[in-house]
Amino acid sequence: MARTALITGASRGIGLELAKLLAADGSNLVLVARSAQALEALAEELRGAHGVEVRVETADLADPAAPGELAAALGELEIDVLINNAGFGSTGPFWELPVEGEVGQVQVNVTALTALTRLFLPGMVARKRGRVLNIASTAGFQPGPYMSTYYATKAYVLSFSEGLAHELKGTGVTVTAHCPGATATGFGAVAGNDKNKLFTKMTPASASEVAAHAYAAMNAGKTVSIHGLMNWFGARTVPFTPRAVVLYLTSVLNRP
Ligand SMILES: NC(=O)c1ccc[n+]([C@@H]2O[C@H](COP(=O)([O-])OP(=O)(O)OC[C@H]3O[C@@H](n4cnc5c(N)ncnc54)[C@H](OP(=O)(O)O)[C@@H]3O)[C@@H](O)[C@H]2O)c1
């Protein structure tokens, strides 16, 4: 029987590429984001190319009511794969950034992800099968001056996913936190860091290669997966590096 996957942030970037991979594998899809037109265009393309069922649910996940409304709209539809991918960042001295964006990041990157996982997990556990893929970031491994809120949200995603994966052992349901490094998507323009060293001194990965890596990690049931050798090295050496050095290096990468 075909799986049904719900993907947040499917209108562009990594989420769009994940939608393509799942559709190519015969999964039916629920595509979620704010951009209705982009979602409808993608849905049309995937139905035509792969003959799968694709449903579009327009939602602003910065609205605290959105996860509950989404679950209610889907009713009895069984979600076998939940991909919490929607997310955004902001760059600058925290006290100068608009409060809506800072709180919105916590809402989208953390609260909506938590709510959707809580809403769709019971069905997966009852059916003894399911996959949750949370798109975290290499940002989740350390604090990030000038992107302090964003880094903190991704630390939550990482910690939450690891804890939950342990709870779910033996249930047939897995949780994967996938951690991309800099990736060429709309993220940099939204976060305002596409001209910073993080993006200019490093070659960003493509959204399609990151999505393929995340998809393979999810299907393998890995708990934490880091895209790219340099990203892996950077993330995994954080605990052995003096905190002041970590903070200095991250601030250099992020400074506007
Ligand atoms: N690109 C990177 O360098 C990078 C690195 C590490 C991790 N990540 C993570 O990867 C994930 C995907 O980002 P991306 O790089 O593909 O960026 P992107 O191209 O900007 O895509 C972000 C997606 O999230 C959706 N989204 C944003 N705010 C939303 C809201 N309030 N409600 C519903 N959907 C919302 C956007 O759709 P609408 O605008 O249509 O709502 C879009 O589909 C994010 O969690 C990001 O933190 C990115």
Image (tube, helix red, strand yellow):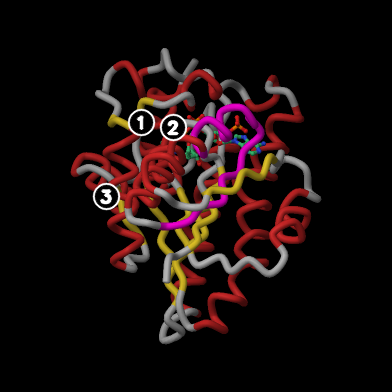
Q: Residue furthest left?
A: 229
Task: Count the numbered circles shown.
Answer: 3
Q: Which residue is mark 1?
A: 183
Magenta segment: 27-43
Say the numbered circle drawn on residue 13.
2
Give the SS element for disc 1.
strand
**CB at disc 2 and ligand 1 closer than 8 Å:** yes
For the residue carrying disc 3, how many other residues have a C-alpha within 10 Å: few (<14), some (14-19), or many (20+)?
A: few
Q: Which residue is mark 3?
A: 237
For the residue carrying disc 1, how many other residues have a C-alpha within 10 Å: few (<14), some (14-19), or many (20+)?
A: many
Give the SS element for disc 3.
loop
The reply to whether the magenta stretch includes residue 191 is: no
Most foreground residue, 253 or 125: 125
Q: Give x and y (percent) for residue 253.
A: 38, 24
Q: Give x and y (percent) for residue 194.
A: 43, 17
* Inter-mark Cα distance, 1 to 3: 21 Å
**CB at disc 1 and ligand 1 closer than 8 Å:** yes
Of the residues shown, which amino acid type is indicated by label 1? Thr
- Relative placement, left or right, of 103 versus 211 is right
**Could you tell me if the residues under marks 1 and 3 are in contact, i.e. CB atoms within 8 Å?**
no
For the residue carrying disc 2, how many other residues have a C-alpha within 10 Å: few (<14), some (14-19), or many (20+)?
A: many
Of the residues shown, which amino acid type is indicated by label 2? Gly
* Inter-mark Cα distance, 2 to 3: 28 Å
The reply to whether the magenta stretch includes residue 32 is: yes
Name the residue rendered at 22%, 46% in the picture.
Answer: 233
